[in-house]
Image (cartoon, rainbow, N blue to C red):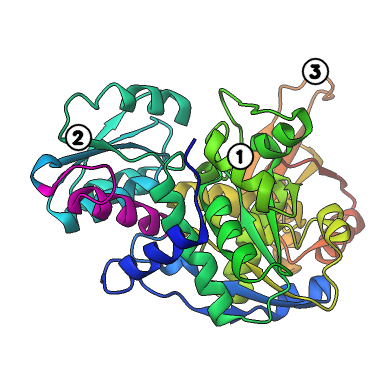
Amino acid sequence: MSSVTIADVEAAADRLEPAAIVQRTSVERSRSLSERCGADVRLKMEHLQRTGSFKTRGAYNAISRAVDGSGDGTDESEIDRVVAASAGNHAQGVALAASGAGIDATIVMPESAPAAKIEATRGYGAEVVLRGNAFPEAMAHAQTLVDDPGTRFVHAFDDPDVVAGQGTLGLEVLDQVPDVDTVLVPVGGGGLAGGVATAIKSRSPETRVIGVQTEGASTLSESLRAGELVTREEPDTIADGIATGGLSELTFGLLKEHLDDVVVVSDDDVASTILLLLERAKQMVEGAGATAAAALLNDDARDELDLAGETVVPLLCGGNIDVTTLKEVVTHALVDRDQLIELSVRIDDTPGTMGEISTLIGAERANIRTVRHERSRPDLPVGDADLVFEVETNGPAHVDRVLKAVREAGYEVEWTAQEG
């Protein structure tokens, strides 16, 4: 089995440096996250790449090697097409790299892939084929399309050239933050984590590299416990970029050798992190892009890692979030923070009552988003109804003021559960 060495990563860095396709992304300190964990948190803004993610690094390295004949023994005239499977970000990286090399690209994506990622991939000139509900199905179909010697399959993570290209991000972090103590990296198929860990541990062995996964896609932690690869046919997480269903032998070997630890966060943590980064850092990231930083909000992960006093760099590796997903994530996070609630008010079903209660809520500077009138529930007395208001607030203290105002007006009101 091929592996990846620091020499491979350094060669990839030399290959990327003169190319205009991959840029050196900035590092910025996060005061909010630093205060949360008592550390000096520096955000690596990899989501600001042209394609919105780190994936262009690995795709460009693999495709440029294939085209110039240094990757698989072919010469330029023999490579005229690449095929890949992706949930979105690898797709865009491959499409852009193929366009730059003047060759065709066919990308297979799951039907559940975000619309923004599908359209962006097509925008870079690739043919997009939608197949299956999850990444494993898209992968299986993509592998059937490699039907002639002139086609190169560019795997999202089970490819040494791709992993070496992703590892250049680790070299960049060390160059920008030479005193870094801990690097937090999201783990899906393990290409980014494997490459970054290889680079950092080779150059700075004392720096910790911590993998971060979500509960619905925690195949690395499960594989480490089992001592062998564990896969999930349908990973379930809002971080679609790491919903690969498993690692490869290549990446699993690299992570076992170089990774210091792996922690697991919830989708709630990821949603909260997306909102925090949007509000405080003015950065919009997707689920996978927020996963590493989410470890700083998860109490168990933060306690396990003991980051106090350290310089910590979470990799914000992707920013391709579509508007529908952003709306769902923000709504979920607002519910979790009690800034979006439901109030159920029992009333005599007479004209003008809804207006009176709406005035009470508005007088407390809370905003009513929706209201529904329930008259047919079996527990309602004849002539009564429930008004259910969806209300935006500033948080729990504001909710208490609204409840008090409605109750003091003589109404029976309950703060009911709101699904995010």
Q: Is residue 331 above or below residue 20?
A: above
Q: Given the image, on which type of amino acid does mark 3 rest?
A: Pro
Specify whether 313 is left or right of 46.
right
Highlighted magenta segment, given as a residue range? 53-76
Q: Nearer the viewer, residue 105 or 400?
A: 105
Seen as rendered, the residue at the extreme top is 378
Does the magenta run of residues contain 104?
Answer: no
* Residue at numbered disc 3: 378
Q: Position of residue 270 (x, y in %)?
A: 66, 52
Is the residue marked by circle 3 packed among few (<14), some (14-19), or many (20+) residues within 10 Å? few
- Disc 2 is placed on an element classified as strand
Q: Give percent across and percent down for residue 373.
A: 66, 36
- Considering depth in this image, is 341 or 403 the residue closer to the camera? 341
Which mark sits nearer the N-terminus, 1 or 2?
2
Q: Which residue is mark 2?
A: 151
Position in image of residue 284 (x %, y %): 51, 65
Residue that appears at 79% across and 40% down: 417
Q: CA distance from mark 2 to mark 3?
A: 65 Å
Residue 67 part of the magenta-drawn span: yes
Position of the C terminus, as image quadrant, is top right
Residue 341 — which label?
Answer: none
The answer to whether one can see residue 258 in this image is yes
Residue 368 visible at all: no
Label 1 to label 3: alpha-carbon separation: 56 Å
